[in-house]
Amino acid sequence: MQPWNCLILFVLCFPLYVSSEADVKPSPHITEMTISAKTFARFSQVTVATVVSNSDEASREAMFAVQVPTSGFISGFQMTTENKTLRGLVQEKSIADKSYDKAKTSGSSAGKVSQTPSLPGRDMDNFAVFINVAGNSTAKFELAYQEVIERRLGVFEQKIHVEPMQIVPNLSVTCSIEEPQGIRVFSYILPNQTAKKESSSTAVDIRATPKKRIVEFRPSMEQQRMYGEEGVGGDFIISYDVAHQNDGGIVLVQNGYFVHYFSPNGLQTLPKNIIFVIDISGSMSGFKLKKVREVMQVILGKLKENDFFNILLFDDKVSLWKPEPERATAHNIEVAKKYADETLVARGSTNINSALLDAIDLLRGLFNRENGRGKVIVFLTDGHPTAGVTVPQQIRQNVKKSNEGLSSIFALGFGFDVDMPFLEALAYENGGFARRIYEESDASEQFENFYDEISRPLLVNVRMDYPPSVVVVEDATNRKFPQYFDGSEIVVSGKLRDRLRAADWQAKVTAEGDSRLEFTATPKNLSDVPDVTPDFVERYWAFSKIRELLKKALIAEKTEQRFYRELALNMSLAYQFVTPLTSMVVTEAVHASTEIPRGIIERDAFMVQSSNVRSHVVAGKLPTALQTNACGRLIPRFAALVLGLISVVIA
């Protein structure tokens, strides 16, 4: 029997097409694939376990694709054959690359995780596991990832991709969802189907309690063949919502950490001021502008009479429907529809800077007359700035300085030629978000769904406050939100000063709706709740904090950017998340001593508080919690210890 001497490298992959070799031999057969998703309070742990069998005398390489939501992080990998187990450790990418190269150079049987031969689904990243299975043997590997399930359009939706590329004797997907607020509505959609179902059906069994749903999808081999020769291929989609009250939401506390969910109901929709900023440069010609014309007819019809709106079209020049925003009367909407239908015609180059600055000026003209309203700029483009100011960093600076928190800017990137990092940074630092519109037949529907997400503002100037004597405020995730929209949810997580302190304090939420509003929420301690992972809230906070640090790095100046990236790297290493800054290296675990004890991971040593980071950046000094290695990289003391341990393992 061949010994297992493998090293597998996990890297975040961009969607690329990869041609297969003509002489590829048959892959090992999958005898079992089980996908388990356990969700508690929107935080989900998904494990994909696959057993493969190679009945041939010679070893065979197998490649298995796993699609992970872009909002998720891979958190574990394990591979087992006979009495040997390989487990993954997360390293900084450059170090992981060197480990992988060393394994190949030494003649070890090397595997890796890299891009798959097909594009991933929407809002998904592809990971491919390349693994060499010895002759006449079986192997099992488990890939785990964690994700936060976000609320959009009034529901939480989780997509689990199922595509073994063959008929599998034992195939199952099990989803367990538990929500402390109770589950109000629930449905699921089978792979490659569109019909929503709420109860048990063919190959699906559902068990339900007021706060929990367990869904098991277990298609027989015959049922799998109904999908085609390669069996099941598509997304298993779970949708649900919880019970919402007109209050301060729910605060969960566990082992020194908290997470606060805020999504009040029973509020009046606020009127809004909205400017549609639409790219009509030459690259938008044909299909793209055809879809934009279609959806503008629908979106304009959804405006409410108390809304103010305007349409700004731009190429190298800027043109307006009206000199200033108009009230959304029935007459004005019909006139605007005709304008959009006749003037959305592609022509020149792309002056993003002038278009956005003019849009901000239009809203500023309404500011003094119309307070207590939602303020939104919807910005749609398919490319890069090619006229006027063309440096993205300068455009961002100009827009942020002019906007000054006046409006939330939501950026839509149409297709794959657009500069999404630029749009993401632009939107994030102006209180919005960026979304890609896929250049496919349902592009109009994608645009319409996006508009529905931001069309009904309920609150503005939302602020979440916690007693500083109880909460380490500077370690909490973002606590200020320019607007809260119907169907969404605001979430804040953080650390307590005393790990033993539980529920003898209150969270306070202040906001402006149709009047000045104030909500409170009393924490609930999870220590007595059965079957809840002991570090659930802590990992929720770490997950959210890393995502936030990566966003801050995206918009920061070069000096600050380095520190935000290092903090995100440190936390990724401490919590063993595969992020854009890390990779996962898998080595053979020969002795139990090669495993890293949990006590080594002194996570508090990594968290340099944001205020300290800023003061050090301004002063040009290095935070004391960080140290520099021989290569000039900032690495925490814990990381140095772990990397030393890894070097022993690899050797």
Image (cartoon, rainbow, N blue to C red):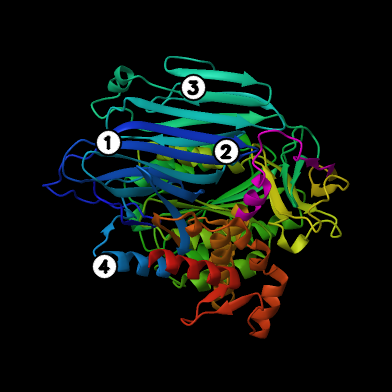
Residue with the mark numbered 4:
106
Query: Gap between marks 3 and 1, in whole Å?
Result: 36 Å
x and y percent of residue 403 in the render?
Answer: 64, 64
Mark 3: which amino acid?
Lys
* Callout 2 secondary element: helix
Residue 650 lies, in percent from the top left, at 39, 65
Q: Nearer the viewer, residue 559 or 327?
A: 559
Q: Give the CA separation, mark 3 to mark 2.
A: 20 Å
Hey, which residue is sitting farthest left in the picture?
23
Q: Amino acid at mark 1?
A: Ser
Q: Which residue is mark 2?
A: 452
Residue type at numbered disc 2:
Asp
Of 509 and 436, nearer the camera is 509
How far is disc 4 from disc 3 in space, using C-alphas? Answer: 53 Å
Image coordinates for residue 154, horizontal then vertical, percent: 62, 33
For the residue labelled by badge 3, is the local secondary structure a helix, a strand or a loop? loop
Of 132 and 2, the residue lying toward us:
2
Q: Residue at x 61, y 47 (%)?
A: 309
Q: Which residue is mark 1?
A: 53
Is label 3 or label 2 in front? 3
Q: Is residue 216 above or below residue 592?
A: above
The C terminus lies in which quarter of the figure?
A: bottom left
* Magenta stretch, residue numbers: 520-542
How far apart are the alpha carbons under marks 1 and 2?
48 Å
- Name the residue located 33 percent from the left edge and 48 percent from the top edge: 129
> Please, what secondary structure does the residue beneath circle 4 have?
loop
Among the two numbered marks 1 and 2 on one chain, the one whose residue lies closer to the N terminus: 1
Residue under numbered circle 3: 196
**536 magenta-colored:** yes
User: Badge 4: how crowded within 10 Å, few (<14), some, or many (20+)?
Assistant: few
Between 136 and 258, the one nearer to me in the picture? 136
